[in-house]
Structure formats: structure tokens, C-alpha cells
Image (cartoon, grey):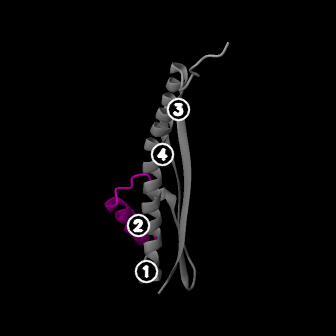
Amino acid sequence: MQLKNKQKGMTGVSIMALLVLIAFVAITLLKIMPIYFDSFKVGDVVSGMKEERGLGDKTNNEITTMILRRLDVNMVSDVTKEHIYIEKTKNDVLIEVDYEVRKPMFGNLDVIISFKKSVEAPAI
């Protein structure tokens, strides 16, 4: 015996499973994307130091303060003074920002994302 109409569509359980999956992906993206946007801002600030003139004449503390002020203007709070490394050579200044961000996801589950941005700026 054949049925005239074949069954079409999803069952209630599969619809609920699909909704749970979509909600999980949406919540994960909403929590992770701001971290990556801040990372792009940090990269822009570090890259912008390449155009800064006279870095060789400034102390490491002055360069660090410049970077932190620019990050403060961009509302980036994950980078602190301890994350900024500066090394001077005769012709260049190597600036490196190495930091990680830890954000809670669900309950006691956290996400940890590491970033490392660096630039070699002229010391002139």
C-alpha cells in the first residue's frame, strides 16, 4: 500500500536542534567578534607607529605611553604596559604587543585568544 502524500519537512525535534545550534553559533560570535575588532585596533595603532618620527630619541616609557594613549582613544582595555615590548637598534625600533584575552563563554567555560602584533619603525 502506498501513501498518496509523502512526508515533507522537519520534525519538531529537528527544528529545536537547529534552533539550539543557531543560538550557540550566534552567542559565540557575539562574544568573540569584539575581541577581534579590538585586535584590529591594536594592529592599526602598532602599524601607525611606523610613521611616527623621532622614536629613536624617545625613551621606552615615552613610546609605551604613546601607544597606551592611542589604545585608550580607541577604547581598547585589554592591553597594558606589561604587554608592550620595545627594542632599539641603531637604525630601527622594534615594537611588539603580545597579549591574550580571556572571556567567559558559558558557565565555567572560558575562551582564551592570543595576539601578537609587531612593527619595525625607523629610529629617525
Instruction: Identify the element where label 4 is drawn.
Output: helix
Q: Are marks 4 and 3 in contact (CB under 8 Å)?
A: no
Instruction: Identify the element where label 2 is drawn.
Output: helix
- The residue at which mark 1 appears reads as 51
**Residue 47, placed above or below residue 101:** below
The three-letter amino acid code for the residue at tag 3 is: Leu
Please name the residue shown 65% across and 16% down the image: 2
- The residue at which mark 4 appears reads as 32
Q: Are marks 2 and 1 in contact (CB under 8 Å)?
A: no
Q: Nearer the viewer, residue 31 or 57?
A: 31
Q: Earlier in the sequence, mark 4 or mark 3?
A: 3
Magenta span: predominant SS is helix
Q: Earlier in the sequence, mark 2 or mark 1?
A: 1
Tell me the tag on residue 67: 2
**Residue 36, placed above or below residue 29:** below
Q: Which residues are magenta?
A: 60-79
The three-letter amino acid code for the residue at tag 2 is: Ile
